[in-house]
Amino acid sequence: MAERSIQSPEPGSIAVWTFVIRDGQTFDLVLNEKLGPPLNHDGLLTIWKMVGTKSEADSVLEMVTGPLIGARVVRHTEVETEEMLAIRHERLGLATEKT
């Protein structure tokens, strides 16, 4: 069972996604390091964050709730503000665009 957030970012925009994962099989998932740290689920309870688009978060959700893992997931999102974007870019060493 998967619950989706009421809050929804603009299509293609970057958001911070929090996954609360319960039950299912144990697994380790390594994504592109810019999306987030490796996801290591012990089969009980895991809270994990990633930064990415809704499409990327949907892919993770489908994988984790699918028949191979079968976890229950509640996913929340925070729409990234301009200030959050600037801080994230600074920490990742990326150039920020001036608008």
Image (cartoon, helix red, strand yellow):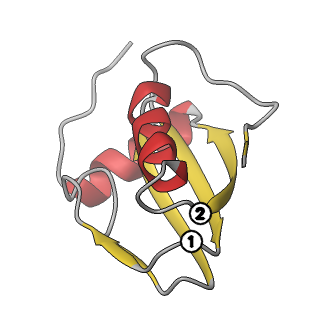
Q: Which mark is residue 90?
A: none
Report the residue at 40% width, 37% height from top: 59
Position of the C terminus, as image quadrant, is top left
Q: Nearer the viewer, residue 98 or 23?
A: 23
Report the residue at 77% width, 30% height from top: 7
Q: How far from the left and from the top, in percent, is residue 4?
A: 73, 37
> Mark 1 = which residue?
24
Helix, strand or loop under label 1? loop
Residue neighbourhood size for the residue with mark 1, other residues' Cα within 10 Å, grouped as few (<14), some (14–19), many (≥20)? many
Q: Amino acid at mark 1?
A: Gly
Helix, strand or loop under label 2? loop
Q: How far from the left and from the top, in percent, is residue 74?
A: 72, 54
- Residue 35 appearing in the image: yes
Q: Nearer the viewer, residue 88 or 7?
A: 7
Taking 9 as reference, is 88 above or below it?
below
Report the residue at 48% width, 41% height from top: 62
Decide if residue 57 is on the left or right side of residue 71: left
Write down the quadrant of residue 23 in the picture. bottom right
How far apart are labels 2 and 1 at the CA level? 4 Å
Q: Which mark is residue 71?
A: 2
Q: How far from the left and from the top, in percent, is residue 21?
A: 62, 67
- Assess whether mark 1 and mark 2 are in contact (beta carbons under 8 angstroms): yes
